[in-house]
Amino acid sequence: MSSRILGWAALVLAVGATIVVVPPLLMPGPQHGGVPMRQQPAGSPPAQPSTTPAPDPQSPSPSRISRPPTTKPAASPTIRFRPITVHAADPVNIRVGARVIECPTCVDGSRVGYIGGPNTLAVRIAGVPRAGERTLTVVYETEQPRTLKLAVDDGPVRELTLAGARSWLIPVHVSVRLWLPAGTCWIRFFNDTGSAPDINTITIS
């Protein structure tokens, strides 16, 4: 009996020594929200929370990126129109029956007369930079009211009744708006129903 008791006692002591010497293989870790946290190996640095990296001061921000300056298209240059003056007696003009008359009070000392009926005067206008409406100024002389008709190339006829200064030695001017094409054109002066005033100069402005 005593030997049996001694055997059980020795068994109990042996089991107890085994429990003390051998640690448990799995140790429960600290709980976080009810979920066990994984232990890190000894000597490893603690985990750091992730953060957004700071911008590199050397790298340009989108607002600093240089962009080529926006340039506006160059405006087309404005063509300035310079007045064009032509003497009626200029050789480049075409006179059909009309004649050059001496006139001491006229520009260049002469004018073109005997315009009317079948006789006409066509004045050449060159150097018009662009088409458009222009002012035609005619310097003329007459002693009595006469009718002057004019047309640009084959365009519509304009009719002017001119009183003048009642003298062949006093120049008078009259202005009218006409449409002229660009480049070169011809302005015809005539009166197919009677006599027209004598013409000294014409100016396009």
Image (spheres, rainbow, N blue to C red):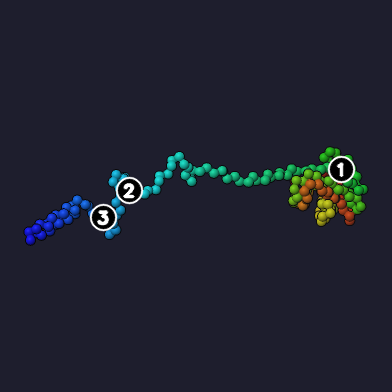
Q: How far is disc 1 from disc 2 in space, using C-alphas?
A: 103 Å
For mark 2, does the 10 Å Cα neighbourhood hold few (<14), some (14 to 19), or many (20 or more) residues? Answer: few
Q: Secondary structure at mark 2?
A: loop
Q: Secondary structure at mark 3?
A: loop
Residue at image position (52%, 42%) is 66
Q: How far is disc 3 from disc 1 in space, using C-alphas?
A: 122 Å
Q: Position of residue 191 (x, y in %)?
A: 87, 53
Q: How far is disc 3 from disc 2 in space, using C-alphas?
A: 23 Å
Q: Amino acid at mark 2?
A: Ala
Q: Position of residue 137 (x, y in %)?
A: 78, 47
Please tell me the numbered disc located at residue 26. 3
Residue at image position (61%, 46%) is 72
Q: Position of residue 168 (x, y in %)?
A: 85, 45
| N-term mark: 3 or 2 | 3
| N-term mark: 3 or 1 | 3
Residue at image position (83%, 52%) is 153
Q: Which residue is mark 1?
A: 92
| N-term mark: 1 or 2 | 2
Q: Amino acid at mark 3?
A: Leu
Q: Which residue is mark 2?
A: 47
Q: Secondary structure at mark 1?
A: loop
